[in-house]
Amino acid sequence: MDKNVLDYVVEKTNDLMGAPSCSGEAKAAAQAWLDAVGTDREAKETRRYVEELEADIMPIDGLIGFAESEHGAQVFGADKAKAVAAHAREIKAAGAKYCDCPACAAVEAILEKKDTLLG
């Protein structure tokens, strides 16, 4: 794998792992991938990592639906849920496809390198 791409994905993986919104599953997959880089397990863990990232990234319409749901209000609080939904609608109007929380932003950046990662 190209060293520049590898360095970039490692950086974004660390960003992901440090994000408060990172799921436990994504954090575990990220660590497993980091541990496998440079070993004979790298290709297998890369595939698993990409699969986990694709499952975890929140599409913008999903974020809007969640923020506007009762469950979203329970998670965020009623006022924050309304603000999240409004923000999501705003970034969607500007062309966003995914949530822009720190975890989703890191995942989106990593998935932009998917073809190179899976080489």
Image (spheres, grey):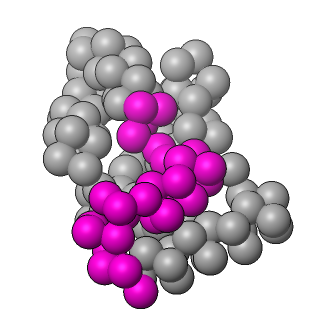
Q: Position of residue 24 (x, y in %)?
A: 17, 47
Q: What is the residue that sits farthest to the bottom in this orientation?
A: 79
Look at the image and tell me whether residue 14 can be seen: no
Q: Position of residue 87 (x, y in %)?
A: 61, 76
Which of 74 and 58 lies nearest the eye of the viewer? 74
Specify the segment rendered in magenta: 53-79
Q: Main secondary structure of the magenta part?
A: helix
Q: Position of residue 90 (x, y in %)?
A: 72, 73
As for residue 14 lying within the magenta part, the answer is no
Q: Residue at x 50, y 78 (%)?
A: 82
As for residue 60 lying within the magenta part, the answer is yes
Which of 103 and 11 lies nearest the eye of the viewer? 103
Q: Residue at x 34, y 70 (%)?
A: 73
Look at the image and tell me whether residue 66 can be seen: yes
Which of 107 and 63 lies nearest the eye of the viewer? 63
Vertical placement of residue 28 versus 17, above or below: above
The part of the image, by quadrant, that contains residue 40 is top left
The part of the image, by quadrant, that contains residue 113 is top right
Vertical placement of residue 108 versus 2, above or below: below
Q: Residue at x 58, y 16 (%)?
A: 119
The part of the image, by quadrant, that contains residue 115 is top right
Q: Residue at x 56, y 70 (%)?
A: 85
Vertical placement of residue 54 versus 57, above or below: above
